[in-house]
Amino acid sequence: MSKGRVRNNIRALRLARGLSQQALADAVEATRQTINAIEQEKYAPSLELAFRIARAFKLNFEDVWSFET
């Protein structure tokens, strides 16, 4: 079984809404550095944080996150 990878479109969503990384971080109770690492797919957030990010965009989880094998 091959290892999968968590993908996201946070950067595109954030820029489309005119939000800075810091503004999104504040909205989801994270650090700007965490948002940066998530956007670059260097860090997979906790499930709780992933849901908070989707909620901040007022989107379904699947509209923000995907899992590719």
Image (tube, rainbow, N blue to C red):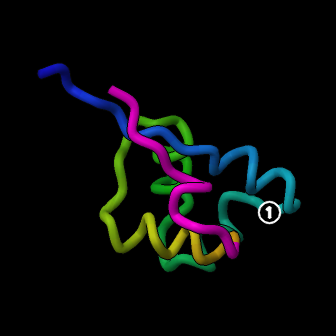
Q: In this view, does 62 lie to the left or right of 48?
A: right
* Span shown in magenta: 58-69
Direction top: furthest residue:
2
Circle 1 residue: 19
Q: Is residue 3 above or below residue 37?
A: above
Q: Is residue 53 left or right of residue 13?
A: left
Q: How crowded is mark 1: few (under 14 residues within 10 Å), some or many (20 or more)?
A: few
Direction left: furthest residue:
1
Q: Percent position (x, y) of residue 59?
A: 65, 69
* Three-letter code for the amino acid on which mark 1 is drawn: Leu
Q: Percent position (x, y) of residue 19?
A: 80, 63
**Residue 66 is covered by the magenta coloring:** yes
Q: Which residue is drawn at 36% across and 57% down?
A: 45
Q: Is residue 52 left or right of residue 47?
A: right
| Quadrant placement of the C terminus | top left
Q: In this view, does 23 lie above or below 4?
A: below
Q: Residue at x 52, y 63 (%)?
A: 61
Q: Which residue is drawn at 54% across and 76% down?
A: 28
| Quadrant placement of the N terminus | top left
Q: In this view, does 60 lie to the left or right of 17?
A: left
Q: Percent position (x, y) of residue 23?
A: 71, 70
Q: Percent position (x, y) of residue 41?
A: 46, 37
The image quadrant that residue 67 belongs to is: top left
The secondary element bearing badge 1 is classed as loop
**Residue 24 is covered by the magenta coloring:** no
Q: Is residue 9 above or below residue 33?
A: above
